[in-house]
């Protein structure tokens, strides 16, 4: 019996092949020059916007700091003068020999004031001082000055003014204005005055206004003070 040559059954496996004829299925390997230019342009616009915002924020911050400095200076002077006005003293007017002028109790007009008061410990020693406020024209415009000298009850000691007892409180102002409320005589009713001629009493109210040049961003809050011991007499030994 012979052996039959029977063919062995098999399956045909076909490996997948890339279809190079379909470019839509190819994977992109990079960017074109046009895409890079568009990306760089957009990135430049983003950085420009960020830089503009940063510069605007810096200017706004600087402006806010400058405003705080200006307001801080005004509030400091405002508080300083309020304390001086609240602590005004008057002295008993006495007849001086040889018709000499008695010590200033209080006198003022629309542009200046002279009164008796105290100064802070970091500026002057203790005791009473003859204090003067006035606006004067200097090299850099009109300035608000304060000067003081030790009070001499007898009027026999003269203390010359010097840079040590004179200060500029505010620079470059347009004008300063003082007004006074009270009675300048027993026969007159209390009212507002643009000058205070009485030397032996202080007004019941003092109003101070400071005006600045046009365009100056500073704004002075009106100062209205009632002296704590107005119209009282300081009797010295």
Image (cartoon, rainbow, N blue to C red):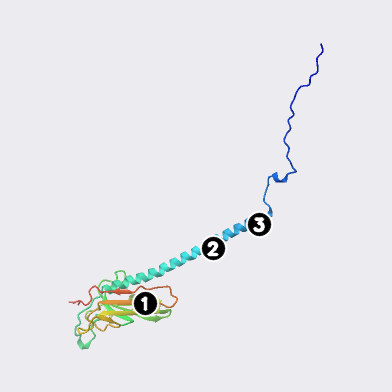
Secondary structure of the residue carrying tag 3 is: helix
* Mark 1, other Cα within 10 Å: few <14 / some 14–19 / many ≥20: some
For marks 1 and 2, give the CA distance: 38 Å
For marks 3 and 1, give the CA distance: 61 Å
Mark closer to the chain start, 3 or 2: 3
Which residue, given by chain and number where applicable, does mark 1 sit on?
210
Residue 182 on image: x %, y %: 24, 80
For marks 3 and 2, give the CA distance: 22 Å
Mark in the foreground, 3 or 1: 3
Q: Is residue 129 visible?
A: no
Secondary structure of the residue carrying tag 2 is: helix
Which residue, given by chain and number where applicable, does mark 2 sit on?
52
The relative height of residue 201 versus residue 59 in the rendered view (above or below) is below
Mark closer to the chain start, 1 or 2: 2
The residue at the far bottom in this view is 98
Residue 173 on image: x %, y %: 40, 77
The residue at the far right in this view is 2
Q: Would you say 78 lies left or right of 103 here?
A: right
Label ID, residue 37: 3
Residue 192 on image: x %, y %: 28, 81
Mark closer to the chain start, 3 or 1: 3
């Amino acid at each position: 019996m012979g052996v039959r040559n029977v063919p062995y059954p098999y399956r045909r496996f076909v490996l997948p092949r890339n279809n190079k004829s379909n470019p839509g299925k190819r994977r992109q390997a990079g960017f074109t020059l046009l895409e890079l230019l568009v990306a760089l342009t957009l990135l430049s616009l983003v950085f420009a916007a960020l830089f503009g915002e940063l510069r605007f924020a810096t200017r706004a911050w600087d402006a806010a700091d400058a405003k705080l400095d200006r307001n801080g200076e005004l509030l400091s002077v405002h508080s300083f003068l309020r304390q001086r006005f609240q602590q005004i003293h008057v002295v008993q007017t006495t007849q001086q020999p040889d018709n000499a002028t008695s010590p200033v109790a209080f006198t003022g007009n629309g542009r200046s004031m002279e009164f008796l008061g105290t100064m802070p410990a970091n500026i002057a020693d203790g005791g009473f001082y003859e204090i003067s406020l006035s606006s004067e024209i200097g090299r850099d415009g009109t300035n608000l000055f304060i000067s003081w000298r030790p009070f001499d009850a007898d009027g026999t000691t003269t203390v010359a003014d010097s840079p040590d007892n004179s200060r500029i409180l505010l620079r470059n102002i347009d004008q300063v204005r003082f007004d006074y409320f009270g009675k300048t005589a027993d026969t007159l009713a209390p009212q507002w005055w643009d000058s205070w001629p009485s030397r032996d009493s202080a007004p019941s109210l003092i109003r101070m206004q400071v005006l600045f040049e046009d365009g100056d961003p500073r704004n002075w809050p009106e100062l209205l003070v009632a002296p704590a011991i107005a119209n009282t007499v300081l009797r010295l030994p």
